[in-house]
């Protein structure tokens, strides 16, 4: 605070600008935003850097408070120390304000408020959670060295998962929360690492390439059969209500992903149903597609990809059941795993 006084003594307009800005802050706290804007504008007209000076004043007051708390001073000692700061502070080497560090305001906030900020960021997206942790050391510590964010994400992602009701009945499971407590208790980090889940903020894509030998043209004397490179793509986009948009096409992702929505269903796509079973450590995924004559079931396992957990869907089997209950296996010899691709935004429908 003494640093600000040294700075403002050389320019009386700073005091007036600070006074107007502080009145604006009080009006904003009271909910009078229109009055606050009037004071803010008045302050900025006097000094266009008034907000920076105001933040520095807050920081210096906070630094003084920390110093007092560290020394465990009483009220009398506080007055004496406050009056002597301007003379003893070695940092006051000039009348120019120091550069403001971006985390000063954050450092002044208690951890419970910062954790509430983290909560809202996590609910926005997992990617934002990671990005916030990279912004400063304080957020990094709170984001990944505290159980609270993991608990929030667990409470956000797992209730959106759809589990096979028949599998729950066969395994005698009536309440998943009870099962969670039995298996993981409050170890949310292990739960998120070991218990698979489906991701909704993007599209799962499988790229299939294989060679197929062609036939020689009639009358051809060539001894070499032509070889064809076959390329096609499979797309899954999952929804928390149990719907999954499924598409098999030769169109590349750049032409598909941005418009891949059930609200504007692409040509030849299908709205299917998805559910998770309890095999493969809760990661057995079944995608069911029903027509008038057949029921198609595609079974996959949720798995990690490198250091990214629950990033891939690996094929287990594909079957078709006719109206009489006969089940046939479909070949998956050429199929490739699905990899999750984050989609920031989709084209408006």
Image (spheres, rainbow, N blue to C red):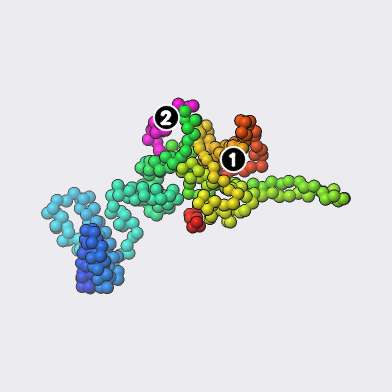
Q: Residue at x 49, y 38 (%)?
A: 196
Q: Is residue 39 left or right of residue 197?
A: left
How far across and how far down the image is residue 105, in percent? 30, 57
Circle 1 crowding by C-alpha within 10 Å: few under 14, some 14–19, many from 20: few
Kindly indicate the quadrant of the structure image that contains residue 334: top right
**Residue 130, placed above or below residue 330:** below
Is 176 part of what is drawn in magenta? yes
Q: Earlier in the sequence, mark 2 or mark 1?
A: 2
- Distance from label 2 to label 1 (Cα)? 31 Å
SS under mark 1: loop
Q: Mark 1 points at which residue?
A: 291
Kindly indicate the quadrant of the structure image that contains residue 147: top left
SS under mark 2: loop
Residue interval drawn in magenta: 170-189
How far across and how far down the image is residue 209, in percent? 66, 47
Q: Residue at x 28, y 54 (%)?
A: 108
How far across and how far down the image is residue 163, in percent? 47, 35
Q: Residue at x 40, y 36 (%)?
A: 187
Q: Name the residue under label 2.
A: 174
How far across and how far down the image is residue 246, in percent? 56, 46
State yes or no: discs 2 and 1 in contact (Cβ < 8 Å): no
Q: Which of marks 2 and 1 is in front?
A: 1
Q: Which of 292 and 66 is in front in this view?
A: 292
């Amino acid at each position: 605070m003494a640093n600000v006084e040294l700075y403002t003594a050389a320019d009386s307009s700073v005091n007036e600008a600070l006074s107007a800005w502080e009145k604006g802050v009080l009006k904003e706290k009271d909910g009078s935003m229109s009055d606050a804007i009037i004071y803010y504008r008045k302050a900025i007209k006097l000094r266009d850097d008034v907000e920076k000076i105001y933040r520095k004043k807050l920081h210096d007051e906070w630094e003084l408070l920390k110093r007092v708390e560290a020394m465990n001073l009483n009220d009398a000692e506080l007055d004496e120390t406050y009056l002597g700061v301007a003379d003893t502070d070695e940092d006051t080497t000039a009348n120019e304000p120091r550069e403001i560090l971006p985390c000063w305001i954050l450092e002044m906030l208690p951890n419970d408020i910062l954790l509430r900020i983290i909560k809202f960021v996590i609910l926005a997206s997992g990617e934002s959670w990671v990005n916030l942790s990279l912004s400063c050391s304080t957020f990094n510590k709170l984001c990944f060295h505290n159980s609270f964010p993991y608990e929030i994400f667990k409470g956000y992602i797992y209730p959106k998962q759809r589990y096979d009701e028949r599998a729950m009945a066969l395994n005698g499971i009536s309440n998943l929360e009870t099962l969670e407590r039995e298996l993981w208790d409050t170890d949310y980090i292990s739960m998120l690492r070991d218990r698979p889940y489906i991701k909704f903020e993007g599209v799962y894509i499988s790229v299939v390439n294989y060679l197929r030998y062609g036939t020689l043209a009639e009358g051809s004397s060539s001894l070499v059969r032509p070889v064809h490179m076959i390329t096609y793509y499979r797309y899954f986009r999952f929804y928390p209500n149990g719907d999954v948009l499924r598409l098999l096409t030769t169109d590349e992702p750049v032409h598909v992903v941005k418009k891949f929505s059930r609200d504007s269903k692409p040509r030849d796509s299908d709205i299917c149903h998805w559910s998770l079973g309890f095999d493969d450590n809760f990661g057995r995924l079944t995608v069911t597609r029903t027509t008038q004559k057949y029921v198609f079931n595609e079974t996959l396992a949720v798995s990690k990809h490198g250091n990214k957990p629950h990033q891939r869907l690996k094929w287990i089997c594909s079957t078709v059941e006719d109206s009489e209950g006969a089940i046939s296996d479909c070949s998956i010899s050429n199929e490739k795993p699905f990899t999750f691709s984050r989609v920031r935004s989709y084209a408006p429908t």
